[in-house]
Image (spheres, coloured by chain):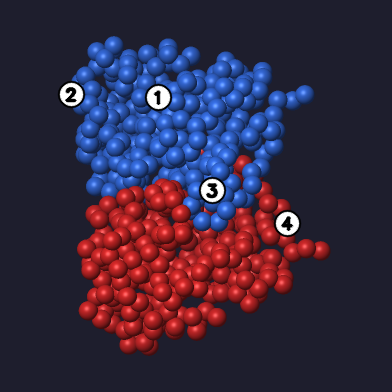
Chain colours: A red, B blue
């Protein structure tokens, strides 16, 4: 028997009802989880974020042990992969009002590991500035919900990953928020800074892990509003997400950056925690 | 042979792939169309808006005659119903970047006509103010796209339709934008006013039709920024959408409103155009 690649509500199928509110309204959440040595990396943190998102969106919480069992059943003999979990409010009748009985829908998808160059981690990647902005919404800020058209439209601004890996998105007041699929950190006078995400953006699992380890590493840091000029003038820049971990930035538009000492220390420390 | 209720890419099935970007990111658009006397009402306008949305989101345009044929095949012997059209960017691999070849996915769903009381049109309905705001996004403003979590969250603020039919949503600067599922108009000193939707909101098909008929009806009007106090202090208020047409508002939070002469004229005129 082959290991299935997709489970929908625990069944080895790869389709959902057209009545699912995930399709109808983007009414749900998702997690993208690295699979390494047959295990989901930072599983508890991903599920904690998903659960927090459910509380914020008033969707019944997932059954954690059921999710873990289902994830495990997709990973038999799988060394390295990506596990995407989608969790929606389930099917409903027409209209925004919640169904009388909400039966959430879960999709677990195993996808192949992206073939990133090892140089990305050591030498860094090039990033660019996007013209598409992130809107404000304090109800939804921080959550990894399924309304992602802003990121999709930002990602259409440049054609491929071979030259430029990521695009930086600004909010409506031209503050730096994040990449389209990563969080961003930078060093300014030996202080590590990352944007405040109270009004928009996604609180990445690796972002939060980096922040929690900074005291131990004795890195002075600040989470605050960030102007675009500050990012251009940074001494070091790095980006984070669950698949890349920590990657230095060596170019941002026309400016170049060295892979600096603070980035190296954090990258090494996070790698030790993940693998 | 029974008439199917749902077509997915022309097939009488009621499910879509989990890889569809409509589910993954809300990467698509929709239309909600009234079916009356076996015909889709304002079909050309709905499809024109869908096509405009495709251009804005860089999704290949739909085949209009194919859509019409498919819609017709769902409506054999159907007097009154709702037709929902969902049109997405189709399946993709993991990540926001567009697929190399985009094959849009279309869902046509026939749903039963909501059993609205006839009194709603003659005597009006009660509406309320929502605490959930609409964020700004000039890239997406006006479009009926699938990222609708703001409306879903606003709709969770009150339990049922029996007392309060609709909730008014404000933007981030507390300007009135729309209802959760309708556009809003009001009369102030014999001038009809409706909010500007450049930064957020959905340009409803009935809203635009109302605006186009005002010169003929010799109703002075203005599309502009609207403060919440203006709406409270209005002489008349009405809401519009493709299923209700024009409905007067008789109560907005604690304030009451008569069904006024301008509302009556516009409602009568729109009804004549629709049915």
Q: CA distance from mark 4 to mark 1?
A: 44 Å
Residue B99: assigned label: 3
- The x, y position of residue B106, in whole percent, is 58, 35
**CA separation in Å, label 4 and label 2:** 63 Å
- Protein chain holding label 3: B
Nearest-to-viewer mark from 4 and 1: 4
Q: Which mark is residue B206?
A: 1
Q: Is residue B267 left or right of residue B31?
A: left
Residue at x 32% of width, y 63% of height: A252
Observer-nearest residue: B207 or B16? B16
In this picture, residue A35 sits left or right of residue B167: right
**Residue B135 position (above or below residue A51):** above
Q: Residue at x 48, y 53 (%)?
A: B96
Instruction: Work out how far the residue at label 1 is from the one at label 3, CA to CA, in angstroms.
Output: 34 Å
Is the same chain shared between marks 1 and 3? Answer: yes
Query: For mark 4, what is the residue?
Result: A12
Q: Earlier in the sequence, mark 3 or mark 2?
A: 3
Answer yes or no: do the residues labelled 3 and 4 have beta carbons within 8 Å?
no
- Mark 3, Cα crowd under 10 Å, few <14 / some 14-19 / many 20+, is some
Q: Earlier in the sequence, mark 2 or mark 1?
A: 2
Mark toward the viewer: 4 or 2: 4
Tell me the residue that label 2 is attached to.
B189
Q: Considering the numbered disc 1 on the image, is that residue within a helix, a strand or a loop?
A: helix
Quadrant into which the N terminus of chain B falls: top right
How far across and down, in percent of the image, does residue A273 sit?
Answer: 50, 82
Chain letter for the residue marked with disc 1 in the picture:
B
**Labels 3 and 4 share a subunit:** no
| Marks 4 and 1 belong to one chain | no
Q: Under tag 2, what secondary structure?
A: loop
Residue A171: x percent and y percent? 30, 55
């Amino acid at each position: 028997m082959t290991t299935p690649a997709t489970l929908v509500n625990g069944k080895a199928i790869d389709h959902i009802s057209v009545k699912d509110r995930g399709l109808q309204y983007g009414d749900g959440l998702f997690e993208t989880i690295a699979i390494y040595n047959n295990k989901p990396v930072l599983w508890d943190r991903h599920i904690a974020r998903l659960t927090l998102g459910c509380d914020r969106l008033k969707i019944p919480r997932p059954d954690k042990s059921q999710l873990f069992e289902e994830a495990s059943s997709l990973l038999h003999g799988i060394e390295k992969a990506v596990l995407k979990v989608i969790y929606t409010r389930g099917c409903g009748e027409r209209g925004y009002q919640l169904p009388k009985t909400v039966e959430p829908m879960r999709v677990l998808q195993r996808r192949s590991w992206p073939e990133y160059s090892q140089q990305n981690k050591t030498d860094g990647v090039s990033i660019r500035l996007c013209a598409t902005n992130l809107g404000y919404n304090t109800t939804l800020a921080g959550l990894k919900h399924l309304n992602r058209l802003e990121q999709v439209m930002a990602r259409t601004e440049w054609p491929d990953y071979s030259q430029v890996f990521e695009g930086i998105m600004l909010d409506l007041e031209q503050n730096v928020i994040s990449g389209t699929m990563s969080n961003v950190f930078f060093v300014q006078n030996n202080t590590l800074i990352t944007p405040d995400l109270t009004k928009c953006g996604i609180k990445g699992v690796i972002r939060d892990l980096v922040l929690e380890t900074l005291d131990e590493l004795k890195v002075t840091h600040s989470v605050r509003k960030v102007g675009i000029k500050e990012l251009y003038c940074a001494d070091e820049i790095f980006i984070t997400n669950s698949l890349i971990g920590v990657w230095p930035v060596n170019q941002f538009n026309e400016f170049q950056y060295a892979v600096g000492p603070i980035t190296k220390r954090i990258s090494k420390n996070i790698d030790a925690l993940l693998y």
